[in-house]
Amino acid sequence: MIIRKARMCDIEAVHSLITYFADRGLMLARSRSMLYEGIREITVAEDQGVLMGTGMLHVIWEDLAEIRAIAVHPDYQKKGIGRMLVETFLAEAADLKIPKVFALTYQPGFFKSCNFRLVPKETLSQKVWKECINCPKFPNCDEEAVVIDVPGII
């Protein structure tokens, strides 16, 4: 298995995986347009051409980034793939010298197992909310906020 940046040929599989979980109310949907436009943020886990998982790291500001749309195919869950994706994003944030990473999630237990801590959404920077206006759940967000201080960044 390898963890790598997404390529254009991955987008349909990424969209399908995210849609699978979104249709079950486990994450927010993402449009193909959003995925193609944000391809540089997308990372995938794959093995011999099979997409096993995906996620995104979105830079919000000089001191804050967001992990978005972490999804691991049901056939490959409980194998550490989600954790590897999170670790990849934290390493990327460290390389960029971004000291804090957050996620808005329906799966806070997963992030807590990766050393994130729950925080009230209201404590997040106002810059976090600029894209929420386009969410179908705005202004009634029911996701939970989790944050982590990126190791090695002061």
Image: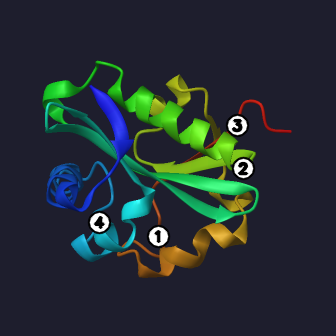
Helix, strand or loop for disc 4: loop
Q: Residues within 10 Å of mark 2 (few under 14, many from 20)?
A: many
- In the rendered image, which quarter contains the C terminus? top right
Q: Amino acid at mark 2?
A: Ile
Q: Nearer the viewer, mark 3 or mark 1?
A: 3
**Of pointers 3 and 4, the one earlier in the residue sequence:** 4
Are dots 3 and 4 in contact, CB under 8 Å?
no
**Of pointers 2 and 4, the one earlier in the residue sequence:** 4
**Of pointers 1 and 2, the one earlier in the residue sequence:** 2
| Residue that label 2 marks | 98
With 30 as the anchor, is 139 left or right in this view? right
Distance Cα–Cα, label 3 vs label 4: 26 Å
Q: Residues within 10 Å of mark 1 (few under 14, many from 20)?
A: few
Q: What residue appears at the point 70 percent right and 71 percent down from the top-left corner?
A: 126
Q: Nearer the viewer, mark 3 or mark 4?
A: 3
Q: What residue appears at the point 31 percent right and 44 percent down from the top-left corner?
A: 54
| Residue that label 4 marks | 30
Helix, strand or loop for disc 1: loop
With 16 as the anchor, is 26 left or right in this view? right
Q: Amino acid at mark 3?
A: Val
**Of pointers 1 and 4, the one earlier in the residue sequence:** 4
In this rendering, the answer to whether 131 lies above or below 98 is below
Distance Cα–Cα, label 1 vs label 2: 29 Å
Are dots 2 and 3 in contact, CB under 8 Å?
yes
Q: What residue appears at the point 60 percent right and 36 percent down from the top-left corner?
A: 91
In this rendering, the answer to whether 39 lies above or below 133 is above
In this rendering, the answer to whether 33 lies above or below 81 is below
Q: Is residue 62 visible?
A: yes
| Residue that label 1 marks | 140
